[in-house]
Image: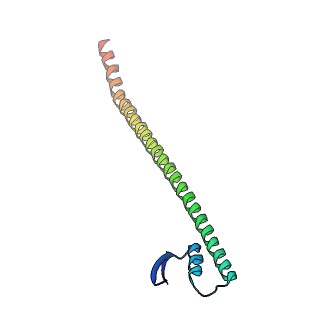
Amino acid sequence: MSQSIQLHSVYTTFPVNSFIWIIILYAGFSIPFDPYILKSKVKVFIELYKQKKALENTTNDLKKAVEELKKANQKILEQQKSVIEEERLKVLLQMAGATAHELNQPLMGLLGYIDLIKL
């Protein structure tokens, strides 16, 4: 958020949260200023600056946490794909075994009859 203030007939735009500008603006006015008011405003702006830095740190921490969660999620998805592929192979092997068993039963019967015919 910016604010325009007329100082010596020149418009200057400055950030509201910059306490340095308050000191410069007070120094530029010809009317006397109350040092207690200036001190309290500086304290407020220092506190705002600290809160802004704390918010930036929290934001950075959250961004790192999000990246870690994305990596963990990607790892889980890869493991899930691996498990699905393993299950597909198991089912395929079971089907192949069942098919071999189904083909083996009649063939064994035929081989038994062939052995009887040979006798």
Give the x, y percent position of residue 65: 55, 55
**17 is higher (above) or lower (below) than 102:** below
**112 is higher (above) or lower (below) than 95:** above
Left or right of 7, for residue 42: right
Task: Please count the marks in the image.
Answer: 0
Give 74 or 99, whichever is nearer the viewer. Answer: 74
Give the x, y percent position of residue 42: 64, 75
Give 55 or 69, whichever is nearer the viewer. Answer: 55
Quadrant of the rendering where the C terminus is positioned: top left
Give 7 or 105, whichever is nearer the viewer. Answer: 7
Corner quadrant of residue 61? bottom right
Give the x, y percent position of residue 29: 57, 84
**55 is higher (above) or lower (below) than 83:** below
Give me the residue at 67% from left, 82% from top.
37
Corner quadrant of residue 87? top left
Left or right of 112, for residue 33: right
**47 is higher (above) or lower (below) than 94:** below
Give me the residue at 67% from left, 84% from top.
34
